[in-house]
């Protein structure tokens, strides 16, 4: 066939396939809606309310039937069709047993949703989300979520309470470990990758529902204290907090979770502005909103509802569709409808949203879609997952300092002293969301380094980070007294060519409810570091932590520092491969590291004050501290490599663009180092004068490139109206004309600069 004909037929073919696909999608949507309506008509008010009720796992189905107390009530409710979803039930056997009750014993046989916090893996644990975000590698992040969905779905789970897309600027807040860091652009890109990874094709039994949480403002808790009040102006809410939520929605996320905090005086759970006006109104969200754990009844403690009944009324009217573990809906909603305080149509709307998702998941066709014992057996913890989490872990590591090329380590003839309790810890790397993973299943740094046999490796603990063995729900005491291991560690260090110190936070020191007032190395670890330094300064400090730390002494004295976060099941192997140069580090910080906890919240995209710089020598009257620098210890976007990247020749295709136009900005990046390496090239802009003040810098694009030694590449970014849009004084997203600066570099500080204009 002649080429032109071929192309013509190909185009027609693709068009036909495309439109058939689109029509099938529309048909499916319509048929879901129809099915929902048919079912809804058959439901009693009580059954409708039941769909809005989510219970925490209450019954070990392999054990006896609960006979008394709350468990018995929940069990009876389940049999009466008064439960729409369960959380924290895992394992095909249990899921199947409970699903069977819902499907076979209730009047309408509506299947349950099974939710679980699959935050960074189920049994095979990936790096904590903050660490994954440091990879800036969207494909890897998406793959990690896909893998987590695959593993979790094999044990019966069909819904994860992830991704957490809260933009977080305050390292004191323990949950920064669960998010993508401080930037809304990076956070939005990561949110999309995670949503796509979890949800993929919902008709497959390898994908599960995702949940964008916590809507909204949770990370802005005053003083970094978890659950604390949040007071946020509209500009920050719209320009900073909302974008990753909106991006999740645009990527098709089916559920949202609201949050524990109050926002400007109104608890998020009972907040109609957030849930009705923005989410379901402006954004036209078609999925459903689940409350956070007990957050409906917590409105009593907030001083916003006098009892559970009023809390239920406020929450449903504000747009919270499903009640997680408060029992307020199941106990009071029907009554509230009878009393005219809640319209039945409001309940109907929530039920429709939930049923629709159940239809979409295919649960009505096969309620046991996720219940396949053989698949469960073959899937959980399989080797392929181990390889994937190892890959993700390597990509998540950030090299913060490497003076005198201490790293990579020589592979033979070296005496290496490995020091620190975390170096021999097989649980801490699993982080605080390891709820389904088994203790002691991570590869420790000690084990990882043992694979390199041609060096002599000696281990000494030095000091425990925590006293006693940390448990998920119990507070653990930090070791501030026991230094009995110092001596052995010092002796070991004295004899070594290189000392690797693994220090930081134990696994449960970050996460929910784990805010910290001190961002230094916990307990006696700083003392240990200084004591070792006195006898051998050739130190590689490997940090294990769930948040940015303030470690100015280490930055000043220690020649090599590696940020290794909590890297999950394959942690030790990933760290060893980076230390030995078998993987060239490519991570970049998704959150600013402060010098001092008092600088927090410190973030790269701050606003300029009226007095941003010292105008005269020794002037006092400018925005600064008299006892600390303004600058961070390590800036956002920062991370070194064993290669060396040089930026030059920033070019703009034009000095200005107008409506529907664009310009291109590009730079040359050269690898002037000795090894092949990856670099994340970052694009920032600054809008100089605007109707609402704009940040001094805003990330607007990035690209990861790989360069061989001496290789040079030109990296080009497009700038258009979308790039410069923000929520303006007109209270809408739009581009304002004016002057802009553009910056490109390998982090948010060391950049090449240019200028452009957006004109009418
Ligand atoms: C957390 C949520 C989580 C839920 C269910 C809450 O305490 O804030 O993020 O999904 O528990 O476990």
Image (cartoon, rainbow, N blue to C red):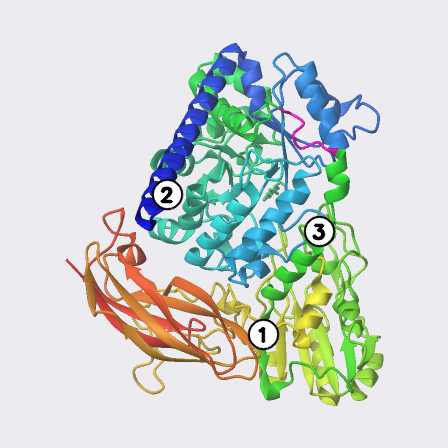
Q: Which residue is mark 3?
A: 124
Residue 150 visible, this angle: yes
Image: 379 above or below 107 = below
Q: Is residue 579 left or right of residue 453?
A: left
Q: Are marks 1 and 2 in contact (CB under 8 Å)?
A: no
Given residues 547 and 586, the one toward you in this image is 586
Task: Say whether disc 3 or disc 1 marks the residue closer to the N-terminus.
Answer: 3
Given residues 69 and 746, the one toward you in this image is 746
Q: Which numbered disc covers residue 214?
A: none
Residue shown at 66% from the left, 36% from the top: 157
Tell me, yes or no, whether the highlighted magenta stretch contains residue 354: no
Q: CA distance from mark 3 to mark 1?
A: 25 Å
Q: Which residue is mark 2?
A: 10
Report ligand 1 position as a quadrant: top right
Q: Is residue 219 left or right of residue 103?
A: left
Given residues 37 and 279, the one toward you in this image is 37
Q: How many numbered markers are drawn?
A: 3
Q: Which residue is mark 1?
A: 399
The kind of secondary structure element at disc 2 is: helix
For the record, the magenta segment spans 366-372
The kind of secondary structure element at disc 3 is: loop
Q: Main secondary structure of the magenta part?
A: loop
Task: Say whether disc 3 or disc 2 marks the residue closer to the N-terminus.
Answer: 2
The kind of secondary structure element at disc 1 is: strand
């Amino acid at each position: 066939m002649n080429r032109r004909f071929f192309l013509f037929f190909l185009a027609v073919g693709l068009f036909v396939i495309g439109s058939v696909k689109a029509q099938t999608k529309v048909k499916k949507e319509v048929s879901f809606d129809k099915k929902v309506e048919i079912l809804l008509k058959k439901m009693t008010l009580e059954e409708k309310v039941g769909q809005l009720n989510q219970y925490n796992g209450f019954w070990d189905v392999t054990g006896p039937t609960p006979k008394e107390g709350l468990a018995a009530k929940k069990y009876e409710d389940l049999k009466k069709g008064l439960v729409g979803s369960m959380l924290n039930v895992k394992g095909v056997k249990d899921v199947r047993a409970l699903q069977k009750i819902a499907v076979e014993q209730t009047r309408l046989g509506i299947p349950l949703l099974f939710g679980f916090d699959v935050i960074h893996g189920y049994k095979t644990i990936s790096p904590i989300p903050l660490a994954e975000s440091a990879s800036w590698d969207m494909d890897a992040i998406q793959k990690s979520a896909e893998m987590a969905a695959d593993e979790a779905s094999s044990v019966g789970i069909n819904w994860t309470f992830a991704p957490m897309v809260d933009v977080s600027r305050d390292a004191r807040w323990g949950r920064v470990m669960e998010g993508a860091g401080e930037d809304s652009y990076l956070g939005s890109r990561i949110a999309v990758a995670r949503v796509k990874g979890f949800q993929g094709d919902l008709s497959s039994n390898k994908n599960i529902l995702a949940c964008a949480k916590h809507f909204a403002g949770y990370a802005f808790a005053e003083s970094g204290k978890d659950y604390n009040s949040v007071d946020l102006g509209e500009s920050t809410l719209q320009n900073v907090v909302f974008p990753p939520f909106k991006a999740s929605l645009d990527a098709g996320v089916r559920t949202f979770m609201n949050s524990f905090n109050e926002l400007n005086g109104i608890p998020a759970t009972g907040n109609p502005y957030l849930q009705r006006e923005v989410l379901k109104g402006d954004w036209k969200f078609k999925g459903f909103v689940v409350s956070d754990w007990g957050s409906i009844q917590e409105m009593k403690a907030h001083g916003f509802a006098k009892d559970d009944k009023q809390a239920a009324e406020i929450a449903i009217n504000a747009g919270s569709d499903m009640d997680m573990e408060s029992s307020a809906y199941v106990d009071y909603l029907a009554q509230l409808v009878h009393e005219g305080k809640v319209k039945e149509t409001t309940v109907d709307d929530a039920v429709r949203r939930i049923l629709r998702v159940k239809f979409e998941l295919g649960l009505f066709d096969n309620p046991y879609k996720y219940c396949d014992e053989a698949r469960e057996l073959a899937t959980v913890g399989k080797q392929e997952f181990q390889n994937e989490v190892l890959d993700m872990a390597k990509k998540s590591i950030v090299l913060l300092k490497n003076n005198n090329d201490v790293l990579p380590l020589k592979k033979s003839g070296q005496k290496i002293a490995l020091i620190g309790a975390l170096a021999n810890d097989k649980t801490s790397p699993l982080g605080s969301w390891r709820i389904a993973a088994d203790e002691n299943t991570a590869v420790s740094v000690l084990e990882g380094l043992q694979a390199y046999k041609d060096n002599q490796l000696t281990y000494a603990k030095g000091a425990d980070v925590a006293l006693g063995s940390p448990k998920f729900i119990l507070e653990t005491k930090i070791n501030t007294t026991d230094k009995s291991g110092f001596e052995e560690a010092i002796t070991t260090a004295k004899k070594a060519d290189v000392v690797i110190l693994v220090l930081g936070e134990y696994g449960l020191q970050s996460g929910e409810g784990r805010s910290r007032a001190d961002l230094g190395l916990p307990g006696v670890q700083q003392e240990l570091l200084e004591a070792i330094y006195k006898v051998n300064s050739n130190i590689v400090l490997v940090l294990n932590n769930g948040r940015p730390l303030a470690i100015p002494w280490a930055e000043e004295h220690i020649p090599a520092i590696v940020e290794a976060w909590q890297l999950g099941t394959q942690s030790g192997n990933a760290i060893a491969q980076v230390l030995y140069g078998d993987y060239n580090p490519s991570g970049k910080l998704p959150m600013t590291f402060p010098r001092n906890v008092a600088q927090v919240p410190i973030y790269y995209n701050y606003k300029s004050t009226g007095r941003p710089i010292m105008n005269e020598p020794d002037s006092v009257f400018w925005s600064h501290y008299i006892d600390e620098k303004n600058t961070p210890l390590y800036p956002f976007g920062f991370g070194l490599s064993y290669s060396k990247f040089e930026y030059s020749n920033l070019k703009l295709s034009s000095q200005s663009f107008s409506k529907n136009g664009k310009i291109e900005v590009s730079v040359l990046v050269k690898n002037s180092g000795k090894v092949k390496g990856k670099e994340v090239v970052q694009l920032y802009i600054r809008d100089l004068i605007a109707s609402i003040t704009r940040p001094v810098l805003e990330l607007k694009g990035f690209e990861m490139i790989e360069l061989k030694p001496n290789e040079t590449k030109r990296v080009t970014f497009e700038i258009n109206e979308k790039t410069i849009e923000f929520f303006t004084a007109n209270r809408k997203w739009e581009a304002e004309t004016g002057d802009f600066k553009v910056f490109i570099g390998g982090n948010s500080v060391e950049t090449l600069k240019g200028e452009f204009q957006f004109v009418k």
